[in-house]
Amino acid sequence: MSQDPVIQNAIISVSNKDGLTEFAQGLVAANVTIYSTGGTRKHLEQAGIPVKDVTEYTQFPEMMDGRLKTLHPKIFGGILCRHDREDDMSAIGEHGIFPIPLVVVNLYPFEETIAKPGVTDAQAIEQIDIGGPSLVRAAAKNHAFTAIACKPSQYPEILAEIKEKGTTSLALRRKLAAAAFAHTAAYDAAIADYFAKEEENAFPETLRQTFERKSVLRYGENPHQQGALYAVPKFAGASLVNAKQLNGKELSYNNLLDLDSALAIARGLPDAAVSVIKHNNPCGAASASSLAEACEKAMLGDPLSAFGSVIGMNRPVDAATAEYLSTPGLFVEAIAAPSFSAEAVEILTTKPKWKSNVRLMSVGELEGPRPEFQTRWIEGGLLVQNTDFTPDDAATWKVVTEAQVDDATREELLFAWEICRFVKSNAIVLCKDRSLIGAGAGQMSRVDSVQISIEKAGDRSTGSVLASDAFFPFPDSIHEAAKAGVKAFIQPGGSKRDQEVIDACNEHKLPMLFTGVRHFRH
């Protein structure tokens, strides 16, 4: 049983004061008396909003530098009382407690504090809120009668109902309660993670992670599957999740996967770089002195596969690049880049046949933070590992063949090695002039991947370099590549048959580098 109590009193104590002034003004106009504490009370008073200090009501002063403010029976009794219980209402009346059917609380900025460089343990601990979570949980528990607002985005809906009928509906209070419990759970998880980082093991005994729903997608990987996009709270790095969409229909599940891969490749390449993704594998990638040149080289890597692809770029998209992409015969589903010039947006949204559909995603500068860990669900559990973003130290690579590697070839091998880590294993890439010209991905046999990459490259194989994400188990791949005109190889090494592979390179008088690092991508 529930009823909707008229809201005559509210308690407000917030760290995030966005939208607070307008909300409080609306409450006062609806004849709601506001009780508040500390900084929130001063903020409201400076805005000319009548507010009563909580200590005047409780007759108990703030103590311990504000650690003790709202933890009082007069506060919690008014929040927790059940309006349909005579004994509850009689008890609060007996002790001079009045009902508080509206609580507006968000918590100390713990995550923002610990993200600051040089923050001390003492500073972090002082940002662990005690009264705030207690107020939020009490109001959420008693949502049959009490409304809890913990986000500024909730203010308009709450105020609209109060203005209309002087109270809030049970449906709204229940929705607010769900958000409130999620809010405190995320807050506690952040605190737990902070202390867990002090453990020697990088992987805590209990893994806690919360996500905020960003959008519900049209469908998942296939039309019969439902899908949604969730964001890691407070993540400030460049990503599709935080991107601003400048044009086109909403992104699909597969668009997001592909664009994420496209961005990951482009941001790891030197100079102006472009990557072209199809079915989560690169079918083209290139670096050049200008973005337009890199874009053309990347699209020509595998023109057939590039039709209907998504593109990632590591530089702002300019007019010259947009003009190239508008060439008749090209078709692009989506583009992710740090930003787009006004001229580029105008060109891409007016010239090509696909102008109204292409998704233009402005992700911001790529130099920001990147996730430290990578997760992957399996049935019944979760796999966690460090991300594989850090470039390898080329100074540690070893030439293991009689033939040596000149500086120009070494640069080509470095480019190919960076591309290879983003291709599904077994992965083989052929590169030439800092451009991907052939890729063999996801094959059960490494020699199959070699043959596919050669087939994709065609005559361009002559003079190219080859990168393999893991060691060659047999020398057959070397013989196949040598016949196609490959001039140098790079691979991790580590096979029992390494010497046979090296001998095959020596037979063809071709150089090979061992990196000592493997980059599987399953």
Image (cartoon, grey):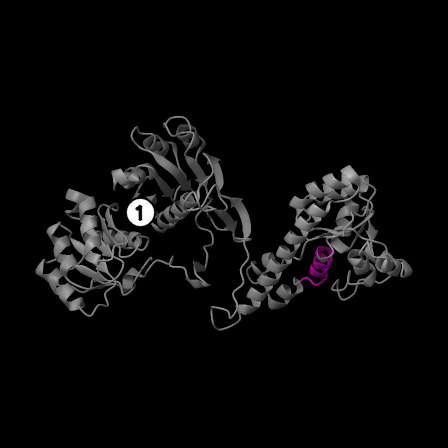
Q: Is residue 133 magenta?
A: yes
What residue sits right under mark 1 in the picture?
282
Range of the magenta residues? 129-140
Q: Residue furthest front?
A: 1
User: What secondary structure characterizes most of the magenta part?
Assistant: helix
- Residue 41 at x, y = what percent? 78, 51
Q: Nearer the viewer, residue 429 or 74?
A: 74
Q: Residue furthest left?
A: 507
- Residue 48 at x, y = what percent? 80, 42
- Is residue 158 visible in this depiction of the protein? yes
Quarter of the view holding residue 136: bottom right
- Residue 316 at x, y = what percent? 41, 39
Q: Nearer the viewer, residue 50 or 355?
A: 355
Residue at (31% x, 60% y) in the render = 519
- Residue 112 at x, y = what percent? 59, 56
Residue at (81% x, 60% y) in the render = 77
User: 494 left or right of 320?
Assistant: left
- Is residue 410 visible in this depiction of the protein? no
On screen, residue 292 above or below 15: above
Quarter of the view holding residue 378: bottom left
Give amino acid for label 1.
Answer: Pro
